[in-house]
Amino acid sequence: MRRNIYFSYSFLLLLIFSLTAFPGNISAQNVIFTGIVKDGTTGKPLKDAHVFIANSTFQSFTDSLGGFSIANISDGRWEISAKKEGFEMQHESILVKKNGNSKLEILLKPLPEQGINRLNLSDKKREKLIEEFLTSFYSGSQFKDQIRFLNPEALIFSEMENSKSTLVNSEDYLIFVNDQTGFLYTLYLLKPFEIGQPILNENISLTFLDLINEVPELISERTSIREKILSISPEFYLRQMLTGELNSSSGESSAEVSFGKFPGEYLLKFNHPLQIDGKGSLSYSGEDLALRAEGSPVFEEKLILGGNFEKIHPFDKLPLNFNSEKILKLSNVEKNAQVMQEKVFLQTDRKHYLRGETLFFKANMIYSNPLLADELSKVLHVEILDTTGYQEYHQVFPIISGKSMGSIFLPIALNQKNYILRAYTSWSLNYGDESSFYLPIQVHDPSIKPAVSMPAPISSGVSIFSDKQTYSAGEDVNLNIMVRDKNGKPVSADLSISVLDLNQAVPLESRISMDEEFQLPPVAPNADLKDFTYPLETRFTAIGEIKDENNNPVEGDVTALINSMENIEKFEVSKDGVFTIPNLTFDDEFEIAIQAKNKDALPIRNIDLEIQNFPTGRDLSQFQFPEMTSTQTASLTAKEIQENMQQGEILLDEFVINEEKTDPVGPMVYGEPDNSVDPATLPLNGSTSQFIYLLAGQVAGMNVSGTPPSISFRNGGEPLIMIDGVPINPPSGPMIGGGSASGRTATDIIAGINVFAIKRVEVIKRTVSMLGEGGRNGIISFIMKSGAELEEANEAMSNSFKPFKLSGFPKLKKFETVIEAQAQEPLLRGLKPTLYWNPEIITSEDVLSQKVTFKSSLSGGPMWIEIKGITADGQPVEGKFVINQQ
């Protein structure tokens, strides 16, 4: 199954914010240019102003203080533009340097108050004009049938004076997406566009947003299309002249190349106009043409194009900062088993943990050919296994720019002490089990710790220096990290750092060196991609099974309701009862409801569903673990463990009333409801999430958002849930079944109700003072069926969808936030073995060191610092140090 993917207008705006705000390539110059945009009249900062370099991917939006930053701009001269609705576009010339860039201030002038005269159009007439505009606007583009216009409401139509021609204008940007090339364009009309006339480059200003990685299965196809665009572009031939590769039809092009006066620029001279057979002509004004390394001109107006070059549509071009070198290399790479090889390397904050703590990790992908990274795995599997191979934990994490980061909560229930942390991609398994990463870890009581001697400090490409020799308890530690090559020169690297309190944690020796971990296993010369059995995952997959009442596999088909009402799809079930739901990308918890039938169309309720994982056949009992020794910390008691394991459990699994009854006698404590909903009028399928969203559609002011759904009314918090007049989730006090309602949301309660057994739902949006604090946020009151009606409801449930809550890509949790929460957990006895963890340290060849700051231990004792990472050219580096030895 291949799922079509479209982007909403708001989602694309979010992409512009997120994808341009954070640099992802450590080998880039990584120059970040900053500035502020202000109202030229009042001097006040302007929020949400668009700051960009035209015809490039360099862009940003200003924050609430008017500030902006644009990352990865290469050295040299650029023209930067700024625009906000209601203000004129402003252009500024800048010089970007590796160091010492001053903060730019851009002042925008308000537009004249009269604005644009709009035609008063009917909906039908407006739709016709939009169609005419797009036909005219796309004219000449080879991709005119693959371009989507996302915000037609931004168009303004008017009549040309003394003419019947229609003009098109806009007070803000227009957004287009080219589904063939994978670019999003943010376009401004600098002059009104006359419908029926060709588009002129000088009348528009646009920027590119690269979406190639948003649909991984289209990366290869889009890369091929971009290669073709590049091969017929003027920049391609200008770059060939820079490198001396170009021969004109009449012989040598006689190109002369010299360094420009400004960084990152080259001066090109050649006999012009230069005719390129079948393409057009190249010429320039002035004595020479200033170019960047990509072949793009520093000043576009200096380049004079003729022939087909002049006719290239703006949507048929590549951004001027496009990495042509990479795509040219990719075009010469034959994709085979050798070059498609990948392996996982994983780092953790340490190797032994307390029960109830959180483990932090970072994974780096090791590639045979890093150029192909965008076309390889985007899903990392992380598992915790006991030494018998039993899986205690499995979770998928996203791989972004060749790395993945996350955290794993280690519950009190982990009582085996010795475990294996396993990390892999499904594709890496095609290269053997040695491409998976295995790390022995120990999860133990606070009264014990590993009995081992401390490893020797090492410095392999990494060195540190601190601002002081000794630190007192809880004092700021300022640490500078340097990464250098064998010649002592700074290099760009992607690092993680862990700092341990040596009075509480024990650093353990790695069983395999980093050099060994980074070695890719040999690939057989005759290995063929067609023979690979494990999939290349760009998204994760749910795998399920249906069985009869005797647990025998059943052949049939299933219908899946994916994440509430987002998508309904049918899937075939194999003879062994297995079905898969591929191409999932949900974050955090989501729901899939399954309805299964056998080949005779009879319902099946024995259904299993989970995120697909790939078990190992390795003998894990061979891993070695250190012995334990006692500490002075009190051990966990049986009572503490039992209470912790019971905390948060759902005590009301399903609310069922079997005896015949009528509605509760007498008036309800809340009086007349604001809304009364009969579930019989709703198209229910048994899913909790679907029921909640449908209910919200019947009740004005009922707010539902997220997965699982969060419920609130206009006045704020979670409403009280009542079943037949009994409060189920009061803020405090007992609940049905005993125990405490702490931690149970309204959605949790409703999930335990058979939605087909609900006779009536009464909604009270106002505050019910008689219920005190419990009635402050409103009430959702369920009146349940009974007797024959209940039996029918249970039958309907058995024939309906069975919901499954699954865990998608988890959102990254900050180390500081987790540690702050752990400090409140009495079972951890106030211990903080990991003082600092940072998986996102980027060093640069242009900066001598990278500074980090953290607090010393509360004991003021010695600290162990461990730094690991990978350089821009793929080499491992690490350092292990002890500081604050008293």
Image (cartoon, grey):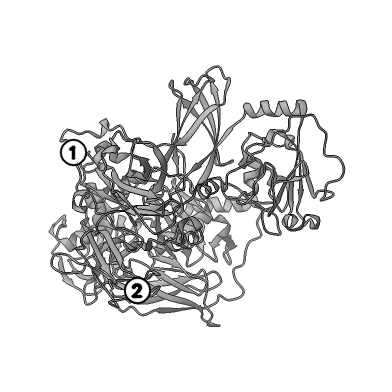
Q: Which mark is residue 523?
A: 1
Residue 63 x, y percent position in the rendering: 49, 70
Q: Residue at x 29, y 77 (%)?
A: 467
In the rendered image, which quarter contains the C terminus? bottom left
Give the residue furthest to the right. 666
Q: Which mark is residue 477?
A: 2
Q: How many labels sit on residues?
A: 2
Q: Residue at x 44, y 60 (%)?
A: 814
Give the residue furthest to the bottom. 42
In the rendered image, which quarter contains the N terminus? top left
Note whether residue 635 is visible: yes
Note whether residue 404 is visible: no
Measured in 3D between alpha carbons, the distance from the residue under mark 2 to the one under mark 1, in whole angstroms, is 46 Å
Q: Earlier in the sequence, mark 2 or mark 1?
A: 2
Foreground of the two, 776 or 2: 776
Above-or-below relation of 357 to 259: above
The answer to whether residue 564 is left or right of residue 614 is right
Above-or-below relation of 211 to 655: below
Secondary structure of residue under mark 1 = loop
Residue 685 location, quadrant: top right
Q: Which mark is residue 648?
A: none
Foreground of the two, 116 or 293: 293
Q: Amino acid at mark 1?
A: Val
Secondary structure of residue under mark 2 = strand
Residue 649 location, quadrant: top right
| Mark in the foreground, 2 or 1 | 2
Residue 487 x, y percent position in the rendering: 13, 67
Q: Residue at x 34, y 44 (%)?
A: 418
